[in-house]
């Protein structure tokens, strides 16, 4: 019965101590949270760590979910908090190394020249690489989790207007990078 | 390239199968199962908001009761009917926002900082419109005493507000601290309005209203320290 229930019902059952509901939530939410982290951090191992930490935090503060409220923004607000926490910690710990790492990651994550043409790409992480952290976050929530603007605003503790603006700017950047990729691909085909 | 085309590319990429290692999911399930117990959800938001307003009101009245209600007695009926309802209204907004700050995924229409400055602007406008004594006597000496009194009352109010919502979870402790401080500051301002008979406009605008940003700043600082502390504790326990 549980796998069919919606997230809000499962959350209430989880608060009541129902393990089947907790397991159903883990199965349903984890893949998209993992994709969300991978789109931000670019490393699968790091995404695994963040996912595990997020579930520990979710479990600890599960009483803060209020029945009747959308569950997805609640999950993502906590996931985002965990990600920012990790990011700040690593920034402080390896301030110097970080700069080099970020540079190399940005270079490796930029859409590669031999990447599949837009439209057939299945690598979300590479597609989102040209975006800033906050833009990537918004696009990942809108596209991967299929959240509404209002839900993204709730998850990011901001207003719907701010989310719209970020999404608009992200699309502007994506348009530029995808157009450049098309041009490059067209030039490669020339004899 | 059109927005629809970008949408299409992103949707295709997002539809790619989402996979997490089954052993990772099993590990997460096992760790949750080990400590799974029923939990009592937080009370409804309106109860928490009402509790916060009540704390502010009690602190204001109790704080002023120690030295008397000279300010309240000196005010005419119009001023009483405008100043205190506006204070309660602002406290309601702040209390509601503080509850939202402590519940992840809550709706927020404006940032905590914007809310604080809007609140201060309302107070400044209110005092400017209602009071017309433009003299300035012992501006600093009397003013600092009022600021300290307000702040000393704001601190316990902010602390009690935090205690009421201690089971919540602030995804942004700095923002939550700022709002808790503002709420405490409004309680401190309530004490001053009840007890201080000095109605000079400059005094009200600078020293009375100043309690709110001062205690908000203190609250934000506490939030920042809490964040540093919890991160250090988590880092140590991870090792």
Image (tube, coloured by chain):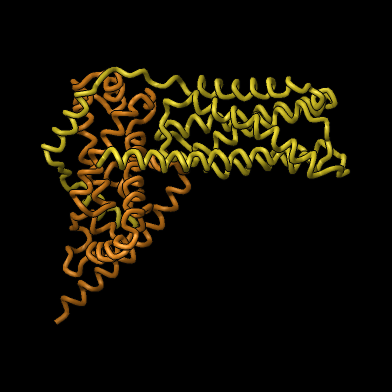
Q: Is residue A121 left or right of residue B184?
A: left
Q: Where the N terminus of chain B falls, by quadrant?
A: bottom left
Q: Is residue B118 left or right of residue A142?
A: right
Q: Is residue A17 visible?
A: yes
Which of A137/B221 is in front?
B221
Q: Where B217 sits versus B4, above or below?
A: above
Quadrant of the rendered image containing residue A65: top left
Coordinates of residue B67 in the picture (x, y in percent): 77, 23
Q: Is residue B115 visible?
A: no
Give the mark count: 0
Coordinates of residue B150 in the picture (x, y in percent): 69, 33
Q: Where A132 sits versus B74, above or below?
A: below
Q: Where A179 sits versus B236, above or below?
A: below
Which of A164/B32 is in front?
B32
Residue farthest bottom in this picture: A191
At 31% from the left edge and 42% from the top edge, which residue is drawn?
B235
At 16% from the left edge and 35% from the top edge, which residue is drawn?
B25
Coordinates of residue B7 in the picture (x, y in percent): 29, 53
Give the colour chain B carries in the figure: yellow
At 78% from the left edge and 22% from the top edge, which residue is drawn?
B69
Quadrant of the rendered image containing residue B207: top right
At 31% from the left edge and 57% from the top edge, which residue is drawn?
A94
Quadrant of the rendered image containing residue A104: bottom left
Which of B148/A170 is in front?
B148
Coordinates of residue B102 in the picture (x, y in percent): 45, 31
Which of B133/B130 is in front?
B133
Give the colour chain A carries in the figure: orange
Q: Where the C terminus of chain B falls, by quadrant?
A: top left
Q: Is residue A120 left or right of residue B116?
A: left
């Amino acid at each position: 019965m549980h796998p069919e229930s919606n997230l809000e019902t499962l959350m209430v059952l989880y608060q009541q101590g129902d393990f089947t509901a907790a397991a159903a939530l883990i199965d349903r939410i984890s893949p998209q949270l993992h994709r969300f982290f991978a789109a931000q951090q670019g490393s699968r191992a790091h995404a695994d760590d963040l996912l595990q930490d997020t579930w520990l935090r979710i479990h600890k503060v599960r009483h803060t979910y209020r029945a009747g409220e959308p569950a997805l923004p609640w999950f993502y607000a906590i996931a985002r908090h965990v990600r920012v926490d990790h990011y700040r910690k690593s920034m402080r710990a390896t301030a110097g190394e970080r700069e080099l790492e970020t540079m190399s990651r940005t270079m490796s994550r930029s859409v590669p020249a031999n990447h599949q043409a837009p439209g057939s790409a299945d690598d979300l992480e590479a597609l989102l690489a040209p975006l800033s952290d906050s833009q990537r976050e918004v696009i990942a929530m809108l596209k991967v989790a299929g959240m509404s603007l209002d839900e993204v605003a709730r998850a990011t503790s901001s207003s719907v207007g701010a989310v719209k603006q970020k999404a608009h700017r992200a699309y502007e950047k994506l348009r530029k990078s995808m157009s450049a990729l098309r041009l490059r691909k067209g030039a490669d085909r020339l004899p | 390239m059109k927005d629809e085309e970008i949408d299409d590319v992103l949707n295709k990429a997002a539809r790619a199968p989402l996979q997490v290692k089954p052993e990772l999911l099993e590990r997460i399930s096992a760790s949750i199962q080990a400590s799974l117990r029923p939990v009592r959800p937080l009370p409804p938001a309106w109860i928490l908001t009402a509790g916060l307003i009540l704390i502010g009101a009690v602190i204001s009245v109790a704080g002023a009761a120690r030295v008397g209600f000279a300010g309240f007695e000196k005010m005419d009926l119009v001023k009483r009917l405008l100043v205190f309802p506006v204070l309660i209204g602002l406290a309601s907004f702040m209390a509601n926002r503080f509850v939202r700050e402590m519940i992840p995924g809550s709706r927020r229409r404006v940032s905590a900082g914007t809310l604080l400055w809007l609140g201060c602007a309302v107070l400044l406008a209110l005092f400017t419109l209602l009071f017309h004594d433009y003299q300035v006597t012992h501006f600093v000496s009397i003013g600092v005493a009022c600021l300290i009194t307000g702040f000393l009352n704001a601190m316990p109010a902010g602390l009690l507000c935090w205690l009421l919502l201690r089971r919540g979870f602030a995804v942004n402790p700095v923002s939550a601290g700022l709002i808790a401080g503002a709420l405490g500051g409004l309680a401190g301002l309530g004490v001053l309005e009840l007890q201080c008979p000095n109605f000079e406009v400059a005094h009200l605008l600078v020293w009375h209203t100043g309690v709110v940003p001062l205690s908000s700043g203190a609250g934000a600082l506490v939030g920042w320290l809490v964040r540093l502390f919890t991160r250090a504790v988590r880092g140590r326990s991870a090792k």
